[in-house]
Every structure is written in C-alpha cells, then in structure tokens.
Amino acid sequence: MYQTTYHRASSVDEAASLFAKGSESKFLAGGQTLLPVMKQRLAGPSDVIDLGRIKELQGVELSGDTLTIKAATAYYDIMTNADVKQAIPAIAYLTSVLGDPAVRYRGTIGGSIANNDPAADFPAALLALGATVKTNKRSIAADDFFQGLFTTALEDGEIITAVSFPVPAKAGYEKMRHPASRFALTGVFVAQTKSGDVRVAATGASQTGVMRVPAIEAALKANWSPSAIDSVTISANGLLADIHGTAEYRANLIKVMAQRAVAAAR
Amino acid sequence: MSTVKLTVNGKAVAVDVEDRTLLVQLLRDHLNLTGTHVGCDTSQCGACVVHMDGRAVKSCTMLAGQADGATITTIEGIAKGDELHPMQAAFRDNHGLQCGYCTPGMIMSAIDIVHRHGGKLDEATVRTELEGNICRCTGYHNIVKAVLDAAGRMKVSQAAE
C-alpha cells in the first residue's frame, strides 16, 4: 500500500471538509473494497477519510411506507434489523448472501453503491425498488444514480448519507454466487410496487453494470408468476463474458434467477 | 505516523504506526502477536480473523487506525491461562487441523458463529457460515465436527459461569 494519511471524521460536515483539504482524498466506509484495491496499489489516495464511526450515518428507520437505511450501516446490521426483515425481507436476504460473515460485519450499503461494482448486489435492489439515494447535497433517484461500471452520479467529495426504499407489495432476490468471491455471477431483484407496477433489475450481467430488464417487467406485469417468464427471450448482446460464463449463459441466468426471485418474493 | 490506542487481549496498548498500517501488521509486527496469520492477504481466506468489539473481522482488510479505541481479541487471548478455550479444545479433540495455518482464523470465526447461533447450530449452518475461512488440508469435515462439539461445550461453560 502506498503512503496515505488516515482521518476519522466524527460528522458528515467534518468528513466533507477533510476531503476538500486533501489533494486526492478518498472516503472509506467499511473498506472491504477500497482497502484491497489500495493494497494492490491500484489506488493511492493522499488522504483516507473514514466515515465508519459517524453516528448520523448509522441505523435503519421505518416510517410509513419508507424504509431508510443510513449509509454506513453494515450489512450484518441490515440483515438482522427487525424493520428490514418486516418491511423488505428481500433486502435482509440479499445481505445474507453477500460476501461472508466477516465481510458483512464491515461492509456498508453506502460503500457498495458508491463503488457500483458491476456484480455488486445492492445496486440491483436500489434499481428494482426505485430507491432514492440521499447525499449531503441532494436526493438522487436510483434510475439516475448508477451510470455504468464503477460510475455513479456522485460528484467529487459528495457523501451518501442514506438510501430510502419505498416498501413494495412484494420483492425477491436470487443470485448465482461465484463460489470464490461470492459476487453475483448474475443476480436478479424483482419488485412489485404497491401501485401494481413491476420493476426488475439484474446485476453481474451487463457490460455497463446494473440494468433494468424491461422484457421480464412486462411479462410479470401481465402475470406475476415464474412461468410468465418462460417465453421471454433475453438477448446476449452487451452482456458480460468471462472465464466464469459466456454472455449467452448470463442471458439464461437472468431468466432463471428472475423466476427464482419471483417464487421467493414476499 | 499516528498513535493507535486499543485494548488487545485485555491489555491497553498505544502503538505508533504509519497510517497505511493494517490491523494485522500492528498485531503481528508491533505487538508480536503472530498467532494471527496472513494467508491470502486479499480478504478471502480468513486466516487473519480477530474479534473487534465482539465481531469477527478480517484484520488484513482494516487499517490499524480504524481500530483506534476498539477492543481486540486475538487467538492468543481466548485461553484462560493453561485452560484452552472450549473451541480450541474441540479442535484438538476432533483433529480439526492438520498444518494449522488457517486454525487461528477458523477458531475466531467459529467462536463468533456460536455466539450468533447459540444452541441452534447444525452442520449446514456451520458449513455456510465458515465460507469466509479457507482450509487447504482438512477437507473441513473435522473442523465442522469441532465447531458443533464446541457449541455444546460453550453452552455448558456459559451455564456454569
């Protein structure tokens, strides 16, 4: 790891001002991606601003039909939270199949979506549920937030403070886990909103990161059942292909995972 | 350089380290607690697992500074004098190790698993929960047996306290 200067911020405002003072600052949440990247010398920030102990970034709130998860809440705390389990059990399930127990104690929802790895789990949940990303400057709809591989709408120095999810009528998530990394070889999050709309998002599939799947949305809107997806055709164009799976394999996984997610949805 | 203050195995320590120092380096290189191992150094193998404020974390994937103010327990801190922790005793009795390299991390993760699941542990749960700890020689079979054995022993020793 290159030399760096570590700062622990005690508030969001302090974090923002510490960030501005560094020549090439980076925010650190749980560090489960940033630190491995720094160890490989793929990143060498002059200053690391630790958001992990900021109290206002911790916790979960359920208010009416909105579930809000603060940005630095660890996966383990999301997975075990009673409000999450009751309001959107699919999110509790998603966190339970993310990484491994030690990673879940440290990794955070804010870190996951700020990094926007094309195979990360949480971007699919945000996109399918039509969540809103709250920052220290503004609110950003999930549809506008994710902008491609490791790219988001965040400006330099902008800090995610929370994610608000509208509580759906039903939602489910299933993924084919890569056996070593536990990232999604392909994962699909399906959601039926309380107004009857259907949104479906796939991660680990597209070359441009998390994506909606309109063909499956249309099929499920007409008939919310796994069999409704049987006749859908997913094109392999633009899908990821690597040693773990071809684009055609991932196209098929989108269908299969979507069917399993619908079957699991509640 | 920064001074990192933390409690390690019950003892308050203050260590001057470079800001880029990882928690595992602080433990091994500065405190000579070499029971915590570095296996893969890429957050996958779990040989470096320690408890921070009661949670099993990978000490190769944390800066020492992030642990400032925390309470750390390493493999060296779980026995009571000459009396092994029930998890250590169960690993010995069930032959849950061969080369022993992964064992400190296995034991620290396994204690955390028992704390979270208590008496409700079954074989499938142990196997799933150990996914962040990689062993290259035992085939896991005896490790799983040891964790299940220790879960019973830990319940007994908690009840006795």
Image: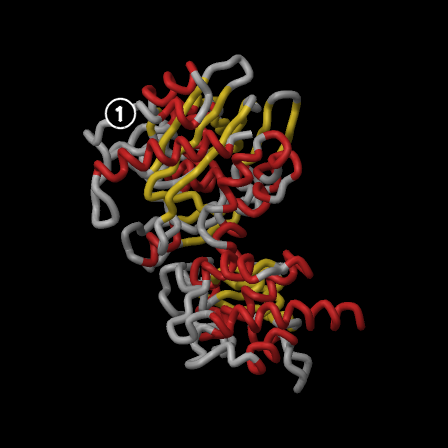
The residue sitting at 24% across, 45% down in the picture is A245
Chain designation of label 1: A
Quadrant in the rendering for residue A249: top left
- The image's colour scheme reads secondary structure
Report the number of numbered marks: 1
Q: Residue at x 36, y 54 (%)?
A: A179
> Who's the residue at 65% across and 60% down the image?
B115
Percent from the top left, x then y, of residue A132?
48, 24
Q: Position of residue A28 (x, y in %)?
A: 45, 46
Q: Position of residue A224 (x, y in %)?
A: 46, 21
Residue B112, above or below A185 = below
**Quadrant occupied by the C terminus of chain A:** top right
Task: Check the image and name the residue furthest to the bottom.
Answer: B82
Q: Residues within 10 Å of mark 1 (few under 14, many from 20)?
A: few
Residue furthest toward the right?
A: B160
In this view of the protein, can residue A136 be seen by the observer?
A: no
Rendered image quadrant of residue B159: bottom right
Q: Up-down: is A146 above or below A214?
A: below
Residue that mark 1 sits on? A233
Q: Position of residue B9 (x, y in %)?
A: 62, 72
Q: Is residue B57 above or below residue A84?
A: below
Q: Nearer the viewer, residue B40 or A47?
A: B40
User: What amino acid type should be assigned to the residue bearing mark 1?
Assistant: Thr
Task: Tell me: A210 left or right of B85.
Answer: left
Q: Is residue B89 visible?
A: yes
A195 with respect to A246 (left or right) = right
Residue positioned 30% across, 34% down in the render? A209
Query: Which SS class for mark 1?
Result: loop
- In the picture, the quarter occupied by the N terminus of chain A is bottom left
